[in-house]
């Protein structure tokens, strides 16, 4: 008999992910998306802006990325089985983790000296 980690769930497009693979996908995507507002001056990496983004726009964009990555994680959890109930502690910890993931991008954008 196979364990939950060995059972693969079919995703749209024929992609199969184990539970462990789903977790790593969400963690790596969170790491990438937390830095996205600081890496590019495009809004949501799609829309070119006339002026550079300020910190407030970057933070709002980061919150939207957090919600999108969280939604993907919830979808993958639902595909693997029952969704566990989360309280405010879960969102406080994952939000703080997302902010921690954003530190390399923030450091690159605001603390490094860029040559003009």
Image: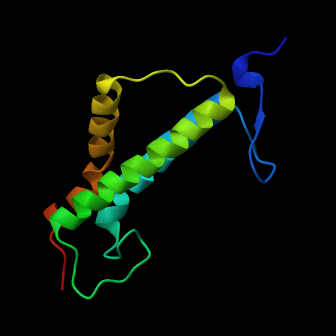
Q: Nearer the viewer, residue 88 or 25?
A: 88
Question: Hey, which quadrant is residue 101 in on the image?
Answer: top left
x, y percentage for residue 69? 46, 47
Expressed as whole percent of the image width and height from the top left, the position of residue 48 reads: 36, 83
Q: Residue at x 61, y 37 (%)?
A: 76
| Residue 5 shown left or right of residue 26 in the figure | right
Q: Is residue 112 in sight in this rendering?
A: no
Closer to us: 90 or 45 = 90
Q: At 74% across and 15% down in the image, what residue appears?
A: 3
29 up-or-down from 53: above or below: above
Percent from the top left, x then y, of residue 114?
A: 19, 75
Closest to the observer: 5 or 48? 48
User: Does residue 56 sit above or below 11 in this rendering?
Assistant: below
At horizontal 31% and vertical 76% (from top left) the residue drawn is 41
- What colouring method underlies this structural image? rainbow
Eyeballing the image, is 79 above or below 54?
above
Could you say where residue 22 lies in the image, as x and y percent from the top left? 61, 37
């Amino acid at each position: 008999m196979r364990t939950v980690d060995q059972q693969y769930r079919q995703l749209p497009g024929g992609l199969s992910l184990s539970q462990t693979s789903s977790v790593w996908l969400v963690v790596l995507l969170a790491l990438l998306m937390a830095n996205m507002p600081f890496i590019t001056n495009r809004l949501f990496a799609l829309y070119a802006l006339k002026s550079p983004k300020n910190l407030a726009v970057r933070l709002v964009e980061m919150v939207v990325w957090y919600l999108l990555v969280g939604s993907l994680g919830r979808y993958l959890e639902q595909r693997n089985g029952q969704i566990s109930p989360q309280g405010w502690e879960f969102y406080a910890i994952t939000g703080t983790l997302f902010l921690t993931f954003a530190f390399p991008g923030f450091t690159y954008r605001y603390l490094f000296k860029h040559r003009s």
